Image (spheres, rainbow, N blue to C red):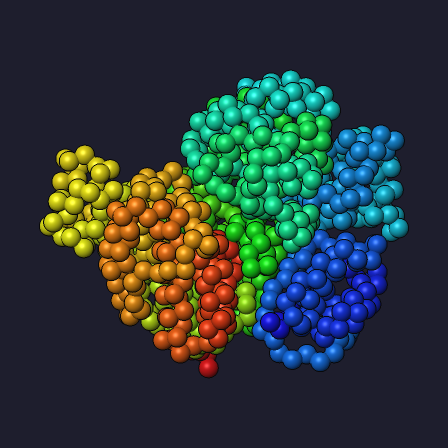
Amino acid sequence: MIQRLRIVIRGTVQGIGFRPFVYKLAHDMKLPGWIENTPAGVFIEVEGPHLHLEKFLLRLQKEKPTKAFIQSLEFSYLDFIGLTNFQIKESRQKGQPTALILPDIATCPECLAEVFDPNNRRHLYPFTNCTNCGPRFTIIESLPYDRPRTTMKHFTQCQQCQEEYENPQDRRFHAQPNACPVCGPHVELWNPAGEVLATHHDAIQQTIDCLKEGNVVAIKGIGGFQLMVDAQNEEAVQSLRQRKHREEKPFALMMATIADIRQLCMVSPLEERLLRSAEAPIVLLQQIKPDFQWKIAKSVAPNNPYLGVMLPYSPLHHILLKKANIPLVATSGNRSDEPICISENEALLRLNKIADVLLVHNRPIVRHVDDSIARIILDQEQILRRSRGYAPLPIMLPFAPVPLLAVGGQLKNTIAINQGSNVFISQHIGNLETLEATRAFERVIFDFQNMYKIFPYHIISDLHPDYISTKFAANSQFTHQGIQHHYAHIAACMAENGLNQRTLGICWDGTGFGTDGTIWGGEFLLITQHSFERFASLRTFPLPGGTKAVKEPRRTALGMLYQIFQDELLEQTELLPYQQFTPSDLKLLWQMLKKQINSPSTSSMGRLFDAVASIIGLRHEIHFEGQAAMELEFVTDSSETDQTYSLEFSSEIDWQPMILEIIQDQQQGLTLSKLATKFHNTLVALIVEAARQSGERQIILSGGGFQNRYLTEHAVRQLRSAGFQPYWHQRVPPNDGGIALGQIYAHLREKTHRDD
């Protein structure tokens, strides 16, 4: 398949022969395209077969000039346009440079070599950095980016550091976080009362001892605190779960080397590139059989075939991992549904009942930044949580409107603000369900406006009137517009793929407020020139208990079964969801459904997944968002069957025949794997049939439902086989972490049409 690969690179890639290198590489691989220097970075486009483009990307980073350092590399696959040769375009110098703030960057190889060199003055110094690596976004107080406007202003450089800083030939020339053991920040080990137990390297050594003894340690990193335990110690991991009230949601792992990770997981070349990248996200990797050196505790990722793994990305992490020589759980330093702590005082207040000790340092953190989460799907990177390493790099839109602020949704919240055609998406904020999270949301908005000196004319939010973000927008001094939730999802995918024409957008997620005031979630939207039309959706079904049903798939299943059996529901004693309730509870829920009390209707695909998970006996209650749907995906096996259930496409897609067939299969003893695989195959067939009936060639897949690897991969392949051009998310999350971008793009599409 011939595609176009677009690459945006920022870092030390200008003035060091980078363009001639790319020119030679492209000619060597016979790939047409171009390269251009701009005030915002280096832009590259090449065209060719997908495998050749993948090889070009890998060679670009592996063979780059010695002095080149890629601080960030973002790429996406676009439509083929027929480029004929490769050329070096004239550099663009006109126009005002965009105020770009770089993300925090993983430790470079040169600095890492110094950290572990006994003869170097920065030997084992946990704050070693240079112009090619280290903190950026988390220490900047205001622009322009220089030392007095960062939290490093508290540390006066010693003579040697100052000489490095002022020497144009030194890689620490104007490295704003530059420091050494003589003049820079240092670490201390505290107990939960804030008493100092050790300082400097003794503090690190005692931290390692605490980890090996099974203690929970709160470690102040680059963007906030992390909670760490020995990942091999089942008791320690369980203790962390109990203290953090995180029953089953997977923990991330940090391991010292790629070789260590390979003992636990399958690692492809693209996955290795992602792990080693300057962004250094948590990467979702498939586990392998337990024939390895490390014996990871089962409670790290219960009932999950994947592990979220990252390499150390700061000198402090590298020192801890190398000296401890054990894999570590590394999870956000927060209480449930709260943002991570960034100061010692916060940590003492909010983590004192979770952590046994705290490893802190005296370099202030300006803003919280979680670890990003990514994976490789269909041989392409996909970001699931866009934060450290990626935020606040912009997404470029094709037009330059007045400043806008989009405040996102309620879950996985991010905000977005634009400066001309650049849309800056904030770091992951999280679920706006606690006072601390709401305060963090408001701080990020204030921070972005002041950091970029952008004060919007207009605020865009979700339609849901009860979202914290919507209330913030409605109460602001600016004009306010609501954008339908699922349209925002699709618009976000359009924005990152450079689309603005008619398409069919398929958005499947948990819930979203519809334009008719009901709860949507299984949507097929025809994207028109400036807005959208609802082409089709799932037949609605009730959720007994409302939001309580979201945490109890058995309730969702009961609501769906009531739609089928009505008053005969109480007689269906052989049904597995039925058996999860006491007779009195069952009768109460039946009455709620019959009288339509606290039983809102929904067309949600996410809730359909929940219902099926309960009906086949896989999961009746959940302990974290999306758990039932994840486990339903995990038991699929494409080798089991290519069969489907009955599910015909129409403007109101009736799931009832499919559910009855699933019940019949379950009662006849079909395995969980075959049940789940047939269900997924049915949804893929539905997508392809919807594409056929829509008359559109371009098909967009968005929403949290398309975090499902099986569903996305099979849908894309079958759409392509049927002659359609599918698009999905790569640089912006398919979940609610991407809708702030979509809110801005949807508003601009409508405004452009009105202006025309």
145 and 702: which is toward the camera:
702
Quadrant into which the N terminus falls: bottom right
Q: Quadrant of residue 363?
A: top right
Q: Residue at x 55, y 42 (%)?
A: 287
Q: Quadrant of residue 94?
A: bottom right
Q: Position of residue 397 (x, y in %)?
A: 56, 68
Give the number of callouts.
0
Q: Would residue 178 be visible to someone looking at this image?
A: no
Is 98 above or below relative to 84? above
526 and 719: which is toward the camera:
719
Q: Residue at x 46, y 29 (%)?
A: 241
744 and 64: which is toward the camera:
64
* In the image: residue 392, left or right of residue 24: left
Q: Would residue 276 be visible to someone looking at this image?
A: yes
* In the image: residue 53, left or right of residue 453: right
* In the image: residue 344, left or right of residue 11: left
Q: Position of residue 243 (x, y in %)?
A: 46, 26
Q: Residue at x 33, y 48 (%)?
A: 670
Is 8 above or below relative to 167? below
Q: Position of residue 671 (x, y in %)?
A: 36, 46
Q: Position of residue 305 (x, y in %)?
A: 50, 43
Q: Residue at x 44, y 57 (%)?
A: 711
